[in-house]
Amino acid sequence: MWLESLCEKELLMMLRQLTEKVEDTVIAAGSEVQTYAKTAAKRTPGLKGIVEQLGEAFKSARPPGEEPETADEESGSV
């Protein structure tokens, strides 16, 4: 009985770790896509709406307190 409980706890721990890694990957991928889209929008004005939609879509995926980069921050201008 205790062995089954131990195996369940280990499995739950491994599943939590996997879930965290998947969430981290989704956040990183979303950030890369958004950065690419922002750069492309500078040359293609019609993409601005898409960039805004991406920002909203990934807003909830950001860790609390982390603010998105603005286009000025990315280009290095102040």
Image (cartoon, helix red, strand yellow):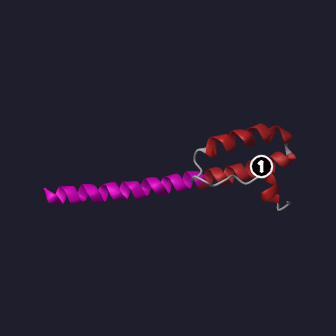
Q: Position of residue 47 (x, y in %)?
A: 79, 40
Residue at (55% x, 55% y) in the render? 25
Q: Position of residue 68 (x, y in %)?
A: 69, 52
Residue 3: name its quadrant. Answer: bottom left
Lateral position of residue 78 relative to residue 30, left or right: right
Q: Position of residue 60 (x, y in %)?
A: 58, 44
The residues colored magenta run 1-27
Q: Which quadrant: the C terminus?
A: bottom right
Count of marks overlaid on the render:
1
Residue at (58% x, 52% y) in the render? 64
| In the image, residue 6 above or below residue 49 | below
Q: Position of residue 73 (x, y in %)?
A: 79, 58
Per the image, the residue denoted by label 1 is 38
Which of these two is toward me, 36 or 5?
A: 5
Q: Residues within 10 Å of mark 1 (few under 14, many from 20)?
A: many
Does 26 appear in magenta?
yes
Does 61 appear in magenta?
no
| In the image, residue 5 above or below residue 58 | below
The residue lying furthest to the left in this view is: 1
Q: Secondary structure at mark 1?
A: helix
Q: Which quadrant: the N terminus?
A: bottom left
Lateral position of residue 27 relative to residue 45, left or right: left
